Each structure stands twice: as C-alpha cells, then as structure tokens.
Image (spheres, rainbow, N blue to C red):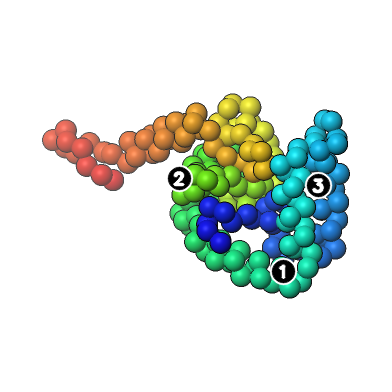
Amino acid sequence: MEPSEFKDYYEILEISPNANSDTVDRVFRYLAQRYHPDIQDTGNQHRFVEIVKAHETLRNPESRAQYDIEYKKYVGRYAIAPEVSREPEAPYEDSVIQEKLLSLLYVKRRRNMNNPGLGNLELERLSGCPREFLEFHLWYLKEKGLISRLDNGLMSITATGVDQSNQGAKRSRAAKFLTDSRGGLVMA
C-alpha cells in the first residue's frame, strides 16, 4: 500500500490503536448514525464510507492484525520530529499550545500533501495537551481561519495558518540574534 493511499482507520474512528473490539463497535455505531447520508444535518457520504471500511477492517481480528502491521510502518515513516511535539515550558499556556498545534499541522502538510490531516487523538498525543484544553484551541484556530476540518474529519492547516506559522518561526529565529560589541549580529 502506497503511503498516499494509506488510511488511518484509528483516526477515522477517533479511537486509540489499543481500543478493544467493544470500543470499535460502540464508536462505529455512534459515528455511523452521525454521518449516515440519510441524516440531513450531519450526513456525509464520503465520511460514512470511510467509517464503514475502518470498522470492517478493525472488527475482524485477522484483518486488524494485518492492518496493524501496515499501520506501524506508516506511523514510523511519518512520525513527527520529537522537537516539534515536546511539552511546552509553561503547561497549557494558550499561545504556546496554539503555535505547537500549527507547527504539527504544518509539518504534517509538508510531509504528505495527499493526506495532510491529523485527528484529535493524534493532536492530543503529539501536543501533550489534554482533550478538554485541546478542544478550545482547535475551535479558536478554526475560527481564525488558521486550520480547517477536512472532508474525512481530520484537522489540517490552511494557507493562512502556514503564513502564521512561518511568522512565528521568523520571530523565534529573530529573538536568537544578539548584537555584539561592534554592532554585528551573532547567534545566541
């Protein structure tokens, strides 16, 4: 399976790779009801098809075991660098968490344009931000137009978000410059 074709069924179902079969079935029923094409408010044909395929694969122990082999290869290949995902110095400081989320989504889009999204569980794990805090930051970044939800339900950085992330990186690099005694710039 090519990396661009790989579907993260755990993200699609918004569950942990350690979830038991009861959890897989329970979450599937909930999401299937929510995204069924016949539901006028929340129906989404594309998302529903992905949810059904994810459930078919993960509910069967043999197909799940085969899928898990591919999943581990995929996660290893596209793992985000530890320096991007480390804990912020001041836990739950809003601007730090928001910059970190933008950085994570920026790196994901740069590494895989065909699959640029990350799910809430992956963002929670990589950012170190608990779900109850993460929801606020995702809402805020989405309202500002810096991130958006893809058709498959994953979060992705927008062009405006890339610009914001680049500005943050420029400010960070500029802060490292110091002026030496002769007026020249040196790196800290």
The disc, 3 or 1, on the residue closer to the chain's N-terminal end is: 3
Residue displayed at 58% across by 34% down: 147
Expressed as whole percent of the image width and height from the top left, the position of residue 157 reads 54, 37
Residue displayed at 61% across by 34% down: 148
Tag in front: 2 or 1 = 1
Where on the picture, by quarter, is residue 145? top right
The disc, 3 or 2, on the residue closer to the chain's N-terminal end is: 3
Expressed as whole percent of the image width and height from the top left, the position of residue 36 reads 82, 41
Q: Identify the secondary structure beneath mark 3.
A: helix
Instruction: Name the mark on residue 79.
Output: none
Say which residue label 3 marks. 31
Q: For the residue carrying disc 2, how many other residues have a C-alpha within 10 Å: few (<14), some (14-19), or many (20+)? A: few
Q: Is residue 94 left or right of residue 179?
A: right
Say which residue label 1 marks. 63
Expressed as whole percent of the image width and height from the top left, the position of residue 110 reads 45, 45
Q: Is residue 175 left or right of residue 11?
A: left
Q: Identify the secondary structure beneath mark 2.
A: helix
**Residue lying farthest left?**
182
Say which residue label 2 marks. 110
The disc, 2 or 1, on the residue closer to the chain's N-terminal end is: 1
Where on the picture, by quarter, is residue 180? top left
Residue 138 visible at all: no
Q: Give the amino acid at mark 2.
A: Arg
Q: Identify the secondary structure beneath mark 1.
A: helix
The answer to whether mark 3 and mark 2 are in CB contact below 8 A is no
